[in-house]
């Protein structure tokens, strides 16, 4: 008997025995013939009969409860795509180019990797964002407070600290002018809170950048603070495919809670102004800061900043096992790979096609979702519906089932068709068994690139996350719908509404993430005005200034900065047309803001 059915059986058996007792008191003569009493059932055959009735009733009760979430889950899938889908394992990998490489290596999103085998099975990952791999390395990194030695930068007057990065080419004989490097992506790694603190220091307190050959360089190339850009928020940098019907702000929240390291990247832009004319293989980058950190000055080194990194996610395309469309059942199990059924799970069904013996085919359209506007759809168009159910045999996760709706079904026609299903899949909970440390887990390229020498995993693979199913789906749907009637920037209920939104997307649900959510104690919004970038002199735009008040005692300030950076983008995506949102972080008990974020109109910076 399944564990999930046992509570129903006990409940039904208790109810039947209570009814039998009432029946015995009301009709003692009939009950006597059945050997029923208010407390016991003397006839073992009657007792077995009652047990059988309880078992059948329990199955009906369980099935009714199982069908109720199908309604709410379908509505959630339509209104909030992928909310109920599992969040596959993620990691950060570092690509090492060959030293003789003289040109940049473009690695597109979706570049596939495979891990070493675990229990005879490997995991497949793919890059979640495009990246450019340069044959350079960080030779040294040093953070210095006043007094420090650095080139004079008129754009960074009043700076109190500087981060000095020495970048060299892998081959000393190859100058930077040959590479033509214009943008360099940095990833901040490290144990504890040091990486977060360094990220906050650079992202929130950089006032200028200088490109030079040494601290005494008399002709450095000076750049503004906008030369350092945050990474991970663009649609093309999403970890998971995101439907155009879904609000992209919810994607950012899901990614923050599931894999915050995805946002621990910064891009150094505008390097071409110096590298294009630099004949040597050594470049020094100075980042001027208006805030100092004595603790970081003692810990920052070259190992905390990694180059050539990209987030990867455990997703891959799979042609599922063909299944005979014989119309003898209401649904068919989608089996991605019969040989690896215990370690392969469907994340999303991409397409369903009927293949006939005569060589013709018919595509099926999703039953509940909006169909492709370019695909003809009539009353006779066949459609399909996907449902998830708990996987059996102790595999963990879910199995997917497809139901077919064919208005043109002809029962007299021979059942000689098969269903061909394309799906995005992942490796269930197998990534949690991968070792980490000492250069493991080992990664290999599925389609080797001649200029890539090695791939290493520098952030351990996360476990697969799954939202709670069954009865909780109704409350999640109600919470989503009710939030549409409350403003997250409204006075009074603003902080409570924002915390409720964050709880909905906190799949990790650890003490740390709960503390981050509870640290939000206030959301205050006022009307604001900002100058429009690139517009004629005197062009202004009206918008909203949002101040997030947080309690730093409940959570580390570096983590609060990263959370606020995500929330700033989240609220900016709520901005109306011809408007903007400008976010400020203020810690409780302090008068001065902890961080200011530029005004954003949707996904674009206004200034």
Image: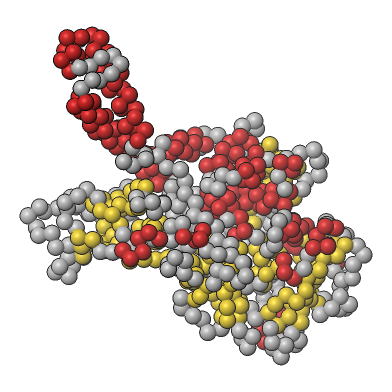
The answer to whether residue 324 of the structure is visible from this angle is yes
Please report the residue visible at 46 percent of the width from the left and 60 percent of the height from the top: 430
Is 530 placed above or below 240 here? above
Q: Name the residue located 35 percent from the left edge and 35 percent from the top edge.
A: 6
Q: Position of residue 485 (x, y in %)?
A: 52, 34
Give percent across and percent down for residue 338.
31, 63
In the rendered view, would you say 47 is above or below 461? above
Residue in the picture at 33% in, 65% down: 339
Q: Residue at x 61, y 34 (%)?
A: 496
Residue 247, given in percent of the width and then of the height, sits at 50, 49
Left or right position of 527 against 497: right
Foreground: 203 or 334?
A: 334
Q: In the image as oriented, which residue stretches furthest toward the right?
A: 147
Left of 40 or right of it: where is 431?
A: right
| The C terminus, quarter of image | bottom right
Is any atom of residue 203 visible in this view?
A: no
User: In the image as oriented, which residue stretches furthest toward the left?
Assistant: 412
Residue 431 position (above or below residue 112): above
The N terminus, quarter of image: top left
Q: Is residue 271 above or below residue 254?
A: below
Q: How many marks?
A: 0
- Name the spot of residue 322 as percent of width and height, x first: 25, 64
């Amino acid at each position: 008997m399944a564990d999930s059915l046992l509570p129903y059986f006990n409940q039904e058996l208790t109810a039947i025995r209570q009814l039998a007792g009432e029946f015995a008191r009301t009709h003692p003569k009939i009950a006597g013939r059945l050997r029923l009493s208010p407390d016991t059932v003397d006839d073992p055959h009657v007792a077995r009969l009652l047990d059988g009735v309880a078992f059948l009733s329990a199955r009906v009760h369980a099935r009714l409860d199982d069908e109720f979430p199908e309604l709410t889950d379908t509505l959630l899938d339509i209104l909030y795509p992928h909310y109920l889908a599992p969040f596959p394992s993620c990691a950060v990998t570092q690509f090492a180019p060959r030293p003789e490489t003289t040109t940049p290596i473009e690695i597109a999103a979706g570049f596939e990797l495979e891990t070493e085998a675990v229990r005879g099975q490997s995991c497949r990952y793919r890059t979640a964002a495009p990246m450019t791999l340069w044959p350079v390395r960080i030779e040294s990194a040093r953070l210095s407070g006043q007094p420090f030695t650095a080139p004079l930068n008129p754009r960074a007057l009043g700076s109190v600290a500087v981060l000095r990065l020495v970048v060299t080419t892998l081959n000393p004989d190859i100058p930077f002018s040959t590479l033509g490097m214009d943008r360099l992506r940095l990833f901040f790694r490290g144990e504890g809170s040091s990486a977060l603190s360094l990220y906050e220091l650079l992202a929130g307190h950089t006032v200028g950048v200088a490109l030079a050959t040494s601290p005494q360089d008399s002709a450095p190339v000076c750049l503004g603070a906008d030369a350092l850009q945050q990474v991970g928020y663009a649609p093309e940098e999403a970890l998971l495919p995101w439907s155009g019907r879904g609000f992209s702000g919810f994607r950012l929240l899901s990614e923050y809670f599931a894999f915050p390291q995805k946002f621990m990247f910064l891009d150094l832009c505008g390097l071409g102004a110096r590298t294009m004319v630099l004949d040597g293989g050594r470049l020094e980058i100075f980042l001027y800061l208006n805030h100092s950190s004595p603790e970081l000055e003692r810990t920052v080194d070259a190992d905390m900043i990694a180059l050539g990194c990209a987030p990867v996610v455990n997703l891959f395309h799979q042609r599922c096992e063909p299944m005979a469309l014989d119309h003898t059942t209401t649904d068919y199990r989608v089996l991605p790979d019969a040989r690896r059924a215990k370690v392969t799970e469907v994340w999303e069904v991409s397409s369903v096609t009927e293949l006939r013996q005569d060589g013709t085919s018919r595509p099926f359209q999703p039953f509940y979702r909006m169909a492709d506007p370019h695909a003809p759809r009539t009353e006779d168009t066949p459609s399909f519906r996907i449902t998830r159910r708990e996987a059996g045999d102790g595999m963990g996760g879910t199995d997917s089932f497809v139901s077919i709706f064919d208005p043109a079904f002809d029962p007299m026609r021979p059942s000689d068709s098969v269903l061909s299903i394309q799906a995005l899949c992942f490796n269930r909970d197998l990534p949690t068994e991968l070792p980490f440390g000492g250069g493991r887990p080992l990664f290999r390229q599925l389609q080797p690139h001649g200029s890539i020498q090695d791939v290493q995993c520098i952030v351990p693979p996360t476990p697969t996350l799954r939202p709670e199913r069954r009865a909780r789906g109704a409350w999640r749907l109600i919470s989503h719908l009710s939030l549409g009637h409350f403003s997250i920037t409204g006075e009074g209920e603003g902080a409570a509404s924002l915390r409720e939104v964050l709880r909905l997307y906190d799949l990790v649900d650890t003490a740390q993430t709960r503390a981050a959510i509870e640290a939000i104690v206030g959301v205050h919004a006022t009307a604001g005005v900002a100058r429009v970038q690139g517009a004629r002199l005197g062009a202004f735009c009206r918008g909203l200034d949002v101040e997030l008040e947080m309690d730093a005692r409940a959570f580390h300030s570096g983590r609060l900065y990263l959370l606020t950076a995500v929330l700033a983008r989240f609220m900016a995506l709520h901005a109306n047309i011809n408007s903007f949102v400008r976010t400020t972080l203020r810690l409780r008990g302090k008068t001065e803001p902890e961080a200011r974020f530029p005004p954003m109109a949707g996904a674009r910076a206004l200034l």
